[in-house]
Image (cartoon, rainbow, N blue to C red):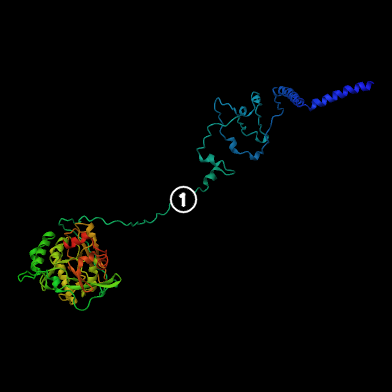
Amino acid sequence: MTGTVTAQPKARISNHIVRIADNPNTVIAALVLSTCVAAIAGYVVTSRALSYLSAPVELAEIDTPLRPTERPASRVRPLLSTADPVVLAPAFSDTAPAQILPPRLADADLPAPPRIETSDATADATPLRVIAGRPAVVPPQRPASGSRLVALADGVSAARALGLPGPVVRPDAPVAAPVRVAAVRPAIRPVTLSTRAPADAEIVLAAATTPEVEPSPRLSDPVPPRAGANPCSPQLAREIPRRPGNAAGGAAAMAAVGNGSGATRDSALVAEALRGNIPAHLRDLQPVEFTGVVGGRQTRITICVTPDYLAIGSDADHVRVPLGLPAALRVADAFDMMLPTTRMVDAIYAQADVRVSPSPMPPTSAMSSTEYFLRHNATVAAQFARAGARPGLLVAGHKKDVVIANRLANAPGRVAIYGWHRSNGDPIQPLSTVHGEYYADYSHGVRLVARTAYVDGRAVDLRGLLTDGQYAGMLNTDGPLSSTTVRLASLR
């Protein structure tokens, strides 16, 4: 009966506990209770540990001071006994240990630095000094004498060290040979450069030093030297007046002109030419031919030129007369002719019946004088006499030509000069417009070209050919002439 009574309450309690355990609120309450118990236990442990950590730490006394290892007497260096004393800066305190220790240990008293005692082997030497703290801010001065520096070497006396060979002075480098630097520089503008106003000018001529041989046509010439009948009609020279019977010879005409220069002399010579006082053989124009392909067809162009340069006088007594550009154009326009181009000058030299070599005279301020004209004319006459030339033959090589070129359109007030070919066919004077238009010296000549030319036997205006894009290249080096150049050449 008793067991039954006891078993029933136990069963009820067990069932009640099972129901409580199955309840979620019971689980949460158990977790909160366990967390509180763990927190209380941690607090108790931490509080007891802090009491020991906050207690002052007593530094153990050093019963026996540290001693350095004794050095052998043989390794003691003289430098230690002669070292200068170290002077510490006043009011210096070393705070380095306090900076690196924990806060509690920084307040404790630091032990005294150990004393280093010398051994018996070094008892007689000067005691060593131990520096407490940082070294002096200012380092010791460097010894002034060389003997104290020598003491730094082991086993070497000062006298012996001073006698050792020192560094060898580097020899001076040999002076380099001077180097001449050649730079291309533009030619200096001549001081005596002529302008439109008449003025004397000087020109330096290069003497022909190449050995003279019998000249031959160049391969680049338009055609070989001409042969056959003269196709140039006498009517092309009909504008040249007949020479008066009372006209003066060349020597007398030049004597009347005097030894002047420039525009004044040019005017007197032009007046003689326009009245017909020129040699008769200059009226016998000579043909010069050019061949080329135009429009896919072989073409031949023939121009008619005076056989020699303009001269004053008769066939037996005449003087070749240089003229400035305005005077030369006046004569050419009056005779219904024009001046040649550079390619025409080359072709005339290649096809000439007689070619002579240039005969330069000394380049002086008198090159433009009438006296120089006469002297050079005599030299040229002697050359043609030795070559067997007779009046009327096409001759070349003895003068430079006054020419027309497109360069004149961009150089107003200048004269264009070209030619004076050597025996090898190369001209002494390339195309130049450096001189003023009134300038003329003994080496210049005026060769005239008829304005009527022939294209495959058909008469045409030469000025039209020189401006034509197809034909101009055969007659002019720099292509078609501009309208400005043509007007300048014809004075119209």
| 37 sits left or right of 178 in the view | right
Q: Say what secondary structure mark 1 lies in.
A: loop
| Residue 91 higher or lower than 480, as above or below | above
Q: Residue furthest right?
A: 1
Q: Quadrant of the C terminus?
A: bottom left
Identified at 13% across, 59% down, the residue is 263
| 39 sits left or right of 142 in the view | right
Residue wearing tag 1: 170
Q: Quadrant of the N terminus?
A: top right
Identified at 64% across, 23% down, the residue is 107
Q: Amino acid at mark 1?
A: Arg
Q: Nearer the viewer, residue 64 or 320?
A: 320
Q: Position of residue 128 (x, y in %)?
A: 62, 33
**Is residue 287 something one can see in this rendering?**
yes
Q: Position of residue 15 (x, y in %)?
A: 84, 25
Question: In the rendered image, which quarter is residue 448 located in?
Answer: bottom left
Q: Nearer the viewer, residue 144 or 416?
A: 416
Q: Position of residue 186 (x, y in %)?
A: 29, 56
Q: Nearer the viewer, residue 348 or 262?
A: 348
Q: Position of residue 130 (x, y in %)?
A: 62, 31
| Residue 46 higher or lower than 254, as above or below | above
